[in-house]
Image: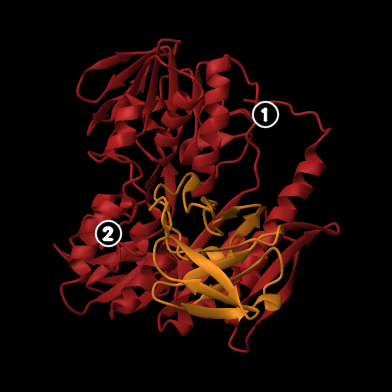
């Protein structure tokens, strides 16, 4: 393999570049990025960056020394618009093409949008440029902020806006936020965090329309209410960035379909991070984006699936001064017990936080820690060990494509 | 020099956080050695005293960056910068931390 092209100058794209060099690939390495920036860390965008506690320079994932060491050709500020059916040519938005022997797809996901959200004052929060624009607006005096969507991005952004002193309302279409991720009982805890943070949480109603002519002035809810707003933040999830792969030989269905080893329908094309549906699951987790590239690159260089990437999912969220950590796989019907610490009468975590275990058929399958990092880490290690034991001996079959 | 706790109150394999500015994490390894480093991970805001101790390495509880307690050097990503190390002594059964970068530290 003489040339490998990484499409996506992202967290997972950078990790793929590191792995390629670490695993001995000494050929030509091309990294294509739609954004003009070198790889940066997104999690702080909704938190420390938004409240002005972190600057852009602190978001950089790499430095000049490492960049020189990677010896890659960076094509930044240009998007990929296609991959030929053989997977040997990447077509770029500016008309150029890159001939390549291997491809790592790391194009991530894009924030979902609402109809009419091109009004001034309406924001999404996914990229550095999104965060710059929102941060600028939030420092121009007191604002009435409506956050649409009570997921992790919505909750973290609402928390940051409240911390900056703005009036904040979160609108969530479901009866409670985060039920699919955490189950109803722990979702109640997250709802209580909003209340504790002084943020109003409106649940059980969707958004009918955004109001305003040039600039947004309010949000009309499906139940007839109307919320005045100077700033609206749309946090309704993300869509994997696969449009550019239509017409390639790859199978696409809410992500690029890969086997357990991140290998697509073409053995010399692998996918990692938010865009990859690995063995039937697409995770939008920072940790997956850093772990999958090792396996993907091993398989890319081997020319077949020699290793698999099934690790215990892990994510965290910082909101309203609390640190939420989750590991494992929650499914509806799992029972949940608080095994350390407590939940107070107002439904929020107690002063020393808590650790909760999700159980299915007598086994722990997932963990939630709030402000209890040491207990969480210990339990997560145990769960990892247990899962490894559980899957050992089981024959690993590549997922059907 | 900051008194931390009595030695017997810091069992092997445990750690304690000193709320100095900046905060310090003091570790007693399974081998009984004492080490002190800056408590805040150089990657992002997380307390290393709450991390996972294995031998002379501590793993950050948030993103699994790992640091060598002897040198403060990161041993894996996502951390790229070292933490400062501090000298630890035991006087009359009390653990003390001596603030300031040690000679030979990676900082």
Q: Nearer the viewer, residue B1 or B52?
A: B1
Q: Position of residue A239 (x, y in %)?
A: 43, 44
- Whichever of labels 2 and 1 marks the residue nearer the N terminus, that label is 2
**Residue A297 is at least partly visible in this image:** yes
Q: Are the two marked residues, 2 and 1, in contact with CB atoms closer than 8 angstroms?
A: no
Q: Which mark is residue A123?
A: 2
Locate residue A209 relative to residue A313 in the image: left or right.
left
Secondary element at tag 2: strand
Residue on which the image places disc 1: A399
Q: Which chain is red?
A: A
Which residue sits at x=54%, y=43%? A288
Q: Position of residue B73 (x, y in %)?
A: 46, 49
Q: Residue furthest bottom?
A: A345
Q: Which mark is residue A286?
A: none
Secondary element at tag 1: loop
Q: Chain of mark 1?
A: A
Locate residue A142 relative to residue A328 in the image: left or right.
left
Q: Residue furthest front?
A: B92
Which residue sits at x=22%, y=57%? A132
Q: Which chain is orange?
A: B
**Residue A226 is at least partly visible in this image:** no
Which image quadrant is residue A61 in? Answer: top left
Q: Position of residue B29 (x, y in %)?
A: 66, 60
Label 1 environment density (alpha carbons within 10 Å; few <14, some 14–19, many ≥20): few
Locate residue A325 relative to residue A54 in the image: left or right.
right
Q: Position of residue A102 (x, y in %)?
A: 44, 16
């Amino acid at each position: 393999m003489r040339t490998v092209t990484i499409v996506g100058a992202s967290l997972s794209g950078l990790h793929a570049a590191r792995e390629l060099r670490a695993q001995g690939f000494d050929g030509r390495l091309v990294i294509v990025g739609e954004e003009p920036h070198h790889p940066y860390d997104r999690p702080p965008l909704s938190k420390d960056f938004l409240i002005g506690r972190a600057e852009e320079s602190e978001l950089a994932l790499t430095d000049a020394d490492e960049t020189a060491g990677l010896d890659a050709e960076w094509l930044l500020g240009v998007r990929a618009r296609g991959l030929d059916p053989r997977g040997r040519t990447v077509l770029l938005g500016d008309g150029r093409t890159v001939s390549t022997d291997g491809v790592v797809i790391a194009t991530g996901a894009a924030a979902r949008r609402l109809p009419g959200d091109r009004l001034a004052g309406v924001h999404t929060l996914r990229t550095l440029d999104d965060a710059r624009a929102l941060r600028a607006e939030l420092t121009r005096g007191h604002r009435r902020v409506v956050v649409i969507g009570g997921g992790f991005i919505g909750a973290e952004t609402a928390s940051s806006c409240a911390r900056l002193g703005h009036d904040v309302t979160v609108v969530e279409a479901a009866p409670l936020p985060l039920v699919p991720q955490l189950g109803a009982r722990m979702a109640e805890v997250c709802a209580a965090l909003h209340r504790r943070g002084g943020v109003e949480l409106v649940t059980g109603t969707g958004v009918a329309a955004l109001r305003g002519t040039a600039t947004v002035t309010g949000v009309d809810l499906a139940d007839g209410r109307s919320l005045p707003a100077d700033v609206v933040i749309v946090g309704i999830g993300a869509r994997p960035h696969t449009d550019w792969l239509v017409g390639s030989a790859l199978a696409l269905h809410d992500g690029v379909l890969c086997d357990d080893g991140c290998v697509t329908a073409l053995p010399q094309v692998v996918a990692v991070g938010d865009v990859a549906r690995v063995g039937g699951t697409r995770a939008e987790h920072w940790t997956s984006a850093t772990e999958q590239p090792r396996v993907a690159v091993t398989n890319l260089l081997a020319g077949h699936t020699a290793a698999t990437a099934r690790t215990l999912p892990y994510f965290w969220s910082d909101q309203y001064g609390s640190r939420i950590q989750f590991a494992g796989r929650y499914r509806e019907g799992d029972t949940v017990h608080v095994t350390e610490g407590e939940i107070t009468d107002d439904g929020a975590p107690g002063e020393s936080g808590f650790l909760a275990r999700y159980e299915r058929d007598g086994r722990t399958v997932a963990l939630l820690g709030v402000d209890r990092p040491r207990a969480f880490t210990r339990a997560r290690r145990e769960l990892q060990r247990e899962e490894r034991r559980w899957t050992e001996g089981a024959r690993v079959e590549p997922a059907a494509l | 020099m900051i008194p931390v706790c009595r030695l017997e109150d810091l069992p092997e394999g445990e750690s304690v956080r000193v709320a100095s500015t900046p905060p310090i994490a003091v570790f007693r390894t399974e081998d009984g050695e004492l080490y002190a480093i800056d408590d805040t991970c150089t990657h992002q805001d997380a307390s290393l005293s709450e991390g996972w101790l294995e031998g002379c390495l501590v793993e950050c509880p948030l993103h699994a960056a790992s640091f060598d307690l002897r040198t403060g050097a990161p041993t894996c990503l996502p951390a790229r910068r070292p933490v400062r190390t501090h000298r630890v002594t035991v006087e009359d059964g009390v653990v003390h931390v001596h603030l300031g970068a040690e000679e030979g530290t990676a900082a």
